[in-house]
Amino acid sequence: MPKIVGIDLGTTNSVVAVVEGLEPTVITLAEGSRLCPSVVGFSRNGERLVGVLAKRQAVANPDRTVSSVKRKMGLSEYVSVASRDMRPQEISACILRKLKVDAEAYLGEPVNRAVITVPAYFTDSQRQATRDAGNIAGLEVVRILNEPTAAALAYGINAATAHTILVWDLGGGTFDVSILELSDGIYEVRATCGDNNLGGDDWDQAIVDWMADRFQEQNDIDLRKDRMAMQRLKEAAEKAKVELSALANTNINLPFLSVNAEGPVHLDLNLSRSRLEALCSHLLDRLVAPTLTALRDAGMKPADLDQILLVGGSTRMPAVQELVRRMFGRDAFPFTGLDPDEAVARGAAIQAGVLNAEVKGILLLDVTPMSLGIETTGGVVSHIIEKNTTLPTQGKQIFTTGVDGQTVVNIRVYQGESRKADTSKLLGNFQLSGIPRAPKGTAQIEVTFDVDANGIVQVSAIETGTGIQQDITIGANCAIPAEDLERLKREYSA
Ligand code: AMP
């Protein structure tokens, strides 16, 4: 049976792993490293560069380089790079393509199927965009797996005795909290919550802003207008942040950062850990509410948890670990037995092994992260599937017309906890037409939501009197039309 690979498509780094002899192995890439920076670039002669090679030329070619594209997945906006407008899915596909090719070189056989991980709190559009990226890269995405669930699998926490664990996952761009119950090989997610726009990148940005402000005060030069200087600030900010996880102070020295009438101007600043923590205290605060929500939704108190697992590079920050200690009243250091950068890919490989019948005795029961519903009269959203429902799931509700003689209903599908349409995320809309004219409130329209094991939503509506039916797969706001998908597949398979 051909192998299915597991891929952690991260904001900062991506990793590919495969099960060999029942154990996951992280694949060493062509350049000799196991982490692939999630960076894509184009050289001046149009050559596509991915990973280390793209990251290396980022400072010299900021207009020709894209990083952290995961933060744009699921949006309909294009990313401008090397004078081209590219969809976020295409850029992610470049990363996936590289991982596929390197995995093929390692395994000595074609790799056509993958399990790809996403933050548990990813919306439907973001999940579909991830699946499209896989397709463009020539990979059938056999499962979209939630990152915290993957991490729990990788840590292989002995599920022989019943166990409740909380996975606290702060990566480069996203934050997830998941609470799982493990017993007899069953990994059952009880609740999940998070923030799709919170991660190490935000800490970096706070340092960049601080440096740009200091530089302007000292030299009266606005670096924000200089893309090359900003790229250097960004790299220096991340380096300083990482150093401050181990040191109390660090020096940031960037010679020849700009020029003025007297010649070159250099940046030379000291940053202390306490200053970094003050600059980023608002970010730290944002970690609290999703954690409390996940505990409340699972009906648990900190004392009910047997273990707290810290995952994602940003949990190495002392302030983050201190917050976990304050919230849970105990130590929650990252496990040392496994590299936290590789845990998610290892878990994805295990799930790939389960789907390929190589690994036995494991069952994952994941949940839908957000409630799903449709808009009814007055802009009110009626939830059909509540958050934290075990997947796959189906929900149905009967609606009716609001106006006499109404022959068409517009069905607007929303995701989120708000009961109001204007503060929920619109996933898509479709029309059911051909409803027989009748007084309002007569027609019976049955709306069905199906959410599969990947967390992807399908909605159908049927007018029960006539049997008229409409189906949609949600995600239309960022979906790639089928003919474009085929063209992109051909383009990126080259
Ligand atoms: P991940 O998405 O799990 O690969 O996490 C990547 C994020 O972790 C990036 O924002 C990194 O800058 C950050 N990171 C990695 N190592 C450290 C460290 N020692 N201290 C602080 N942040 C780190």
Image: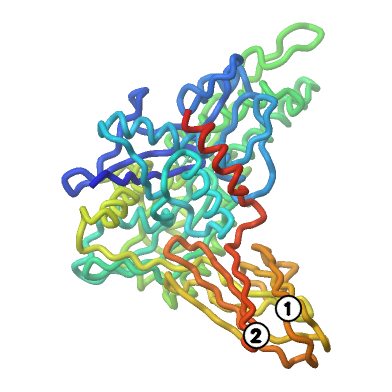
Left or right for 456, reference 263: left
Q: Relative to residue 205, is residue 55 depicted above or below?
A: above
Is residue 373 visible in the rendered image? The answer is yes
- Determine the secondary structure under disc 2: loop
Q: Badges 1 and 2: C-beta atoms under 8 Å apart?
A: yes
Residue 387 vertical position relative to residue 259 in the rendered view, above or below: below
Q: Quadrant of residue 190?
A: bottom left
Answer left or right for 44 relative to 189. right
Q: Is residue 62 above or below residue 433?
A: above
Q: Position of residue 346 (x, y in %)?
A: 31, 47
Where does the image place residue 308, in percent across and percent down from the top left? 36, 60
- Which of 288 and 247 lies nearest the eye of the viewer? 288
In front: 441, or 63? 441
Q: Where is residue 261 shown, x and y percent of the image? A: 82, 8
Q: How many neighbours does mark 2 have within 10 angstroms: few (below 14), some (14-19), or many (20 or more)?
A: few
Q: Which residue is mark 1?
A: 434
Residue at horizontal 49%, vertical 76%?
394
| Residue 466: image tag | 2
Mark 1 CB in 8 Å range of ligand 1? Answer: no
Residue at left 63%, top 71%?
470
Q: Is residue 312 left or right of residue 441?
A: left
Give the quarter of the image for residue 212: top right
